Amino acid sequence: MKILNRSLWLFLALVLAGPTQALAELKLGYVDAARLLEKAPQADLATKRLKEEFAPREEDIFTLQKEVTESEDQLRLNGDVMTEEGRRKIERQVIANKRDLRRIQDEFREDLTFRRNEEIAKIQVLVRQVIELVGKEEKFDLILYEGIAYASQQVDLTNKILERLNKEVEANK
């Protein structure tokens, strides 16, 4: 946020300090970061990779949840007719399984969040490279990427960036 504020102040200083003719010649643009990350094909590919990577662990969690539920059901249905020792054994097993399940779920969430953040970081690097490329090729003076309160459609470059990202995916196929 500080970088954005500094950039805006610098931009305003340049605009106000320079002649008004220079203002008419400035070429500005912005990119909608949220829409870009939502619609970029690289984001879809990253989501698919994460699903494939984490599917086996998700299945393990589902299996353990099912075992805990079955043990609780067995205890509830047959607890009255079980021996005291048999009932305590199943109760201990249920408690241990629940503890394991919570630990496994926490680890799963942490690992998934870490990997998701890694994938987002990769996409953000690519997006910044494409924005820079478009800026240089089309001779923009300033392209804003994050933290925009308002921008007109005239300066919205999001579709151009999305087109380039789509071409990048097609080229890598």
Image (cartoon, helix red, strand yellow):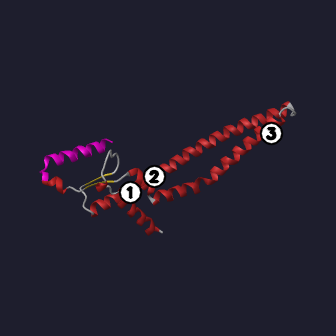
Residue 11 rendering spot, x and y as whole percentages: 22, 47
Q: Which mark is residue 74?
A: 3
Q: Nearer the viewer, residue 108 or 75?
A: 75
Main secondary structure of the magenta stretch: helix
Precedes in sequence: disc 3 or disc 1: 3
> CA–CA distance between discs 3 and 1?
54 Å
**Dot 3, how many residues are within 10 Å of its Cα: few (below 14), some (14-19), or many (20+)?**
few
Q: Which residue is disc 2 drawn over?
A: 120
- Report the span colored magenta: 1-20
SS for tag 3?
Answer: helix
Q: Is residue 149 left or right of residue 173?
A: left
The amino acid beneath tag 1 is: Val
Q: Is residue 19 magenta?
A: yes
Q: Which residue is disc 1 drawn over?
A: 127
**Dot 2, how many residues are within 10 Å of its Cα: few (below 14), some (14-19), or many (20+)?**
some
Residue drawn at 18 percent across, 45 percent down: 13
Q: Is residue 130 left or right of residue 136?
A: right
SS for tag 2?
Answer: helix
SS for tag 1?
Answer: helix
**Dot 1, how many residues are within 10 Å of its Cα: few (below 14), some (14-19), or many (20+)?**
many
Residue 138 rendering spot, x and y as whole percentages: 27, 63
Residue drawn at 42 percent across, 64 percent down: 166
Q: Is residue 43 magenta?
A: no
